[in-house]
Image (spheres, rainbow, N blue to C red):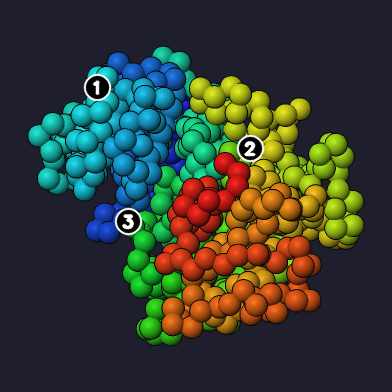
Amino acid sequence: MGKNRGVKGVNVGNWATRRAVFPHTKDKTAFVCRERSLTYSEFNRRVNRVANGLLEGGLRKGDRVAVLFFNSTEFMEVYFACAKGGFIFIPLNFRLTPKELQGIFEDTGPRAFFFHPEFAGTVEGLRELYRRPIEVLAAAGDPVPDFCLSYEEWTAGFSEEEPEVPEPPDMEDPQMIMYTSGTTGRAKGAVLPHRKTFWNTFNDTLELLFDMSAVSLVSIPLFHSGGLNIITMPTFYIGGTIIFQRFWNPEEALQLIERHRVTHFGAVPTMLQMMLDVPSFSRYDLSSLRGVGIGGAPASRELLERIVERIKAPYLIQVFGCTETSIVLSCSNMEKIGSAGIPMFHSEVRVLKDDGTEVKPGSGEVGEICTRGPYVMLGYWNLPEETAEALRDGWFHFGDLATVDEDGYVYVVDRKKDMIISGGENIYPAEVEKVLAEHPKVRDVAVIGMPDEKWGEVGHALILLEDPEDPLSLEEMEAFCQGKLARYKIPKKITFVDSIPRTLTGKILKKELRRLYGGSGV
């Protein structure tokens, strides 16, 4: 057996080792990012340098390593180095403030931290707040701040041979901690084992039709499950080529698709809307696209029809999942407009009522989406109560309420915590928002609950107008909703807003809206 073929343990780190020696991929381009292009064998040698550097720095199995990177090859080098060495990888949202990052650092205590120099100011602010020692602190790129090492100079000092790992991780060991967006409260660190990455990758490879000829454009940030787990890892696993967009720009994405003959592209609805709205959209050749994936938030019928008409990719797929599980439901090729889909090939999903029984398909009954399987997280880092609440009797509870049609397709109606109870009746804001969004005067809308002496709660519509000079009256709104919504579902108040705050994936920040506009609940 050759010197690079010895693989200890079965873990995600093995993928880089094996792709680097597999005859069909060792000299194939694995990654392209701006001016840098790396073959699988070149990439693996760089991974090994990082892994050996961390081991020589004293890190051992279970130690945490954090990164604050744009989409880049360095991100993936540290990711695979951690997977080989048994270190727990922590991708950080580069939009967070030093104070928010301090909370994550206090929670996890990373022993190594890598970042791009563009975030030097944020890192300096973090260093003032977080005083615990970090054994390895390095910046990848120029200029290198004077308080840290150069990533390239640091890695150059270590062997590119496969690392000798004292305790190789196995599939049950934690691979990374991904922090959720925290839209319903404090951000939680989902602990994801190696087996979770494997089963999610296997599911995605089957469902999204990845093969060795795949060329995938990754525009969603890698600190997000959609960018890393849903697009990048299946492409790497199958031996395709990954094109990184350092950060999102809709016209640049069109240019990259044309230049690199991209076959697979994934995005949240807002990103696709921005691409379609580029004035020069029709000038770009997108004929190479075979598959377009949509996730993170519901896509409107209008947007889906525009995608089909203008992008013309033969395979359009909507997906449903979360950081804790990745994708568990999918719906392909406009099969059921508005549906989250049916279970993925290797997933088990049920929609359960409060008494633990399943909703009856086609009945209109509402229950909570739940799943179980090897793709589910181990739990939340240092949060045993939240873990116990989310993982009950072996099932992960999403907190999303849904119905199931007669064919078994799941339709999300709202978040459980966002549900409004008015006079004993359940109101699902997402249902109301969908109707109000169709009004020609409404550009964007969110509905929250507000206290009411008679009914307990009623709906409060927060509306961003198409034309601020042409407001929508309460009477107009009520008339528009007649026949579309039961009267108790129609909001009793309108407030005009300058924007609707959303997460990176397009989800409405209801907690923030309730804080700003006095809604009920937490």
Q: Nearer the viewer, mark 1 or mark 3?
A: 1
Between marks 1 and 3, how big is the CA–CA gap?
A: 30 Å
135, 201: nearer the viewer: 135
Percent x, y for residue 13? 46, 33
Q: Which of marks 2 and 1 is in front?
A: 1
Number of the label disc, if any, that sits on residue 246: 3
Whether residue 301 is visible to the viewer of this picture, yes or no, is no
Amino acid type, mark 1:
Arg
Q: Residue at x 12, y 45 (%)?
A: 143
Between marks 2 and 3, how big is the CA–CA gap?
A: 28 Å
Whether residue 74 is visible to the viewer of this picture, yes or no, is yes
Q: Which residue is drawn at 88% across and 59% down?
A: 362
Percent x, y for residue 96? 35, 43
Q: Is mark 2 on a helix, strand or loop?
A: loop
Number of the label disc, if any, that sits on residue 375: 2
Q: In this view, does 479 lie to the left or right of 3?
A: right
Amino acid type, mark 2:
Tyr
Percent x, y for residue 518? 53, 51
Q: Which residue is drawn at 65% across and 64% down?
A: 492
Q: In this view, does 299 lie above or below 401?
A: below
Q: Name the residue under label 1.
A: 131
